[in-house]
Image (tube, grey):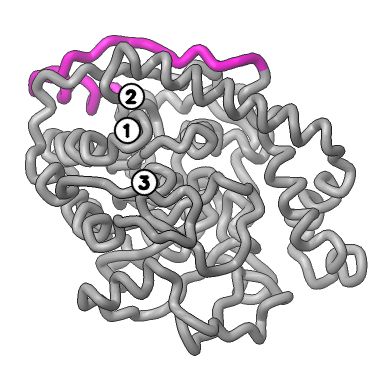
Amino acid sequence: MRGQPVRQGSRLFQDFIAPEDAVAVARLRAAGAVFAGITNCSEFACKGVTTNRLHGPTRNPWDVALTPGGSSGGAASAVAAGLAPLALCTDGGGSPRRPAAHVGVVGMKPSAGIVPHPIGFPEPVFGNSVIGQMARSVADVALMLDSLAGPDPRDPQSVAVSGSFVRAAANPDPAGLRIAYSRRLGLDAPVDPEVAACVERAVHRLADAGAIVEEADPVWPEGAGENGLMPLQFAGLAALYGERYRATPDLFDPDIGQQIDAGLRTGGAEVARALHLREEAYRALAALFARYDLLVCPTTPVTAWPFDRLGPAAIEGRPVTPRGHAVFTPLFNHCYAPACSVPCGLTASGGLPVGIQIAGPRLSDAAVLRLAAAVEATCGYTALVS
C-alpha cells in the first residue's frame, strides 16, 4: 500500500514504507474499495500461527485463548469479528484457507496466475504463492475475484480468464457435478473425529442436492508431503534472508530462524528433487481430475488450539509434528490449483468452526466457487461472530 508501513511481521522491515500499491490493491481501489488497515501475520508468512516479534500474537475471536492459525490470522480474525467485510492475503501453502476454517469465514486460493502480483516482497516458496481472498460469504469472495482477475505482462504466471465469478457463485446448484470426497487427501493423516463428522455431513448434503459424490483419493508420488516439499520454503528463506540471519539472528522469530538454518543446510540437489516432486504431484492431481470435476476434503484436521503453541501435540490420538494441522492445504499450491475453504458447521463439544476445502483443476475457479456456494446454501451456516 503506497505510503504505508508494510512489515511482513519482521523487524527487518519495521521501518519499510511501501513505494507503490500492489496490483491487487490498485485494482480494488479502482473498483471503489476503501482500505481499513494492514493485518498481522507471522514473519514472512511462513508459520502456521500468527505471531511475530513486532506485534505479538493475534487471537481467535471465537475464543481469545485460541489461535486463528496462520499465517493470515490477522486477516481472518478481523473479517470474522466484523472489523471489515473483505481481506487480501497471500497464500503460499494455505495461509488464508486454514485461518478461515478456524474462525468460520470463507478463504479462497485462486489458481496460479488468476490474480497477478508482480509488485511486492519476493516470495520464499518460488512459484507457489498467490493473492488470496477472505470474506464472510462466497459471493463477496467472488466479487473480489471479478475485480482482481486479469493478466499483467510483468507476471510470468499471469493468465486471462473469461466469465464472471459472481455469476458462478450465484448458481449454488451442485447437481451433476462429479465430486471426489477424500477423507484424508490420500495422506493417511489423522483427523479429529468431530472435524471429520462436520465435513461428512456437508458432503452428504451436497449429495442430497444432486451432486455425484464418490470417495476417492489422489495417488500422490512417494514423498509428496512435508519432508519432500518443505526444502523449497527453507531454501527460499535462506536465499532471501540467510545473510541477515547469520549477522543478526536476534532480529528473527526463532521458529523462522530454524527454517532459515535448515535452508542454509539444503543443497541444490535437494531443491531439484523437490521441484521434480512438485511436477509429479501436479500430474497425480491431474489424474484424479480426469475422473472428477472437483475434490472435497477437510481444510484442516483440527479446530483452533491455544495461541501460544505452534500446533496441537496430537490429533485423533496420534502424535503429530507442529505442522500436523497444515497437511491438507499446501499440495494445492504446489499443483497451482484453486482451493476454497468454506465453513461447514461447528464442533459439538467446543462449538468451534470447521471448514471444508473444495479444490479443482487449474483455472476451474468458477466451478470451485459454485460448489462453495452450494456448501454455504446447504449447510445454512452463518460465519460472522456476534
Residue kind at label 2, given as amino acid type: Leu
In the picture of the structure, the residue carrying the numbered disc 2 is 295
Q: Is residue 112 visible?
A: yes
Q: Is residue 61 above or below residue 360?
A: below
Of the residues under marks 3 and 2, which one precedes in the sequence? 3
Instruction: Tell me, yes or no, whether the two marked residues, 1 and 2, touch with CB atoms within 8 Å.
Output: yes
Q: Which residues are magenta?
A: 200-222
Residue kind at label 1, given as amino acid type: Ile
Identity of the residue drawn at 22% across and 40% down: 366
Q: How many C-alpha atoms fall within 10 Å of the one at disc 2: few (<14), some, or many (≥20)?
A: many
In the picture of the structure, the residue carrying the numbered disc 3 is 110
Q: Is residue 201 above or below residue 40?
A: above
Determine whether the residue tagged by mark 1 lies in a helix, strand or loop: strand
Q: Is residue 367 above or below residue 111?
A: above
On screen, residue 370 versus residue 214, left or right, reads left
Q: Quadrant of the C terminus?
A: bottom left
Residue kind at label 3, given as amino acid type: Pro
Spatial CA distance of label 3 from label 2 is 15 Å
Determine whether the residue tagged by mark 3 lies in a helix, strand or loop: loop
Q: Percent x, y for residue 266?
A: 84, 40
On screen, residue 261 versus residue 317, left or right, reads right
Q: Percent x, y for residue 134?
A: 33, 57
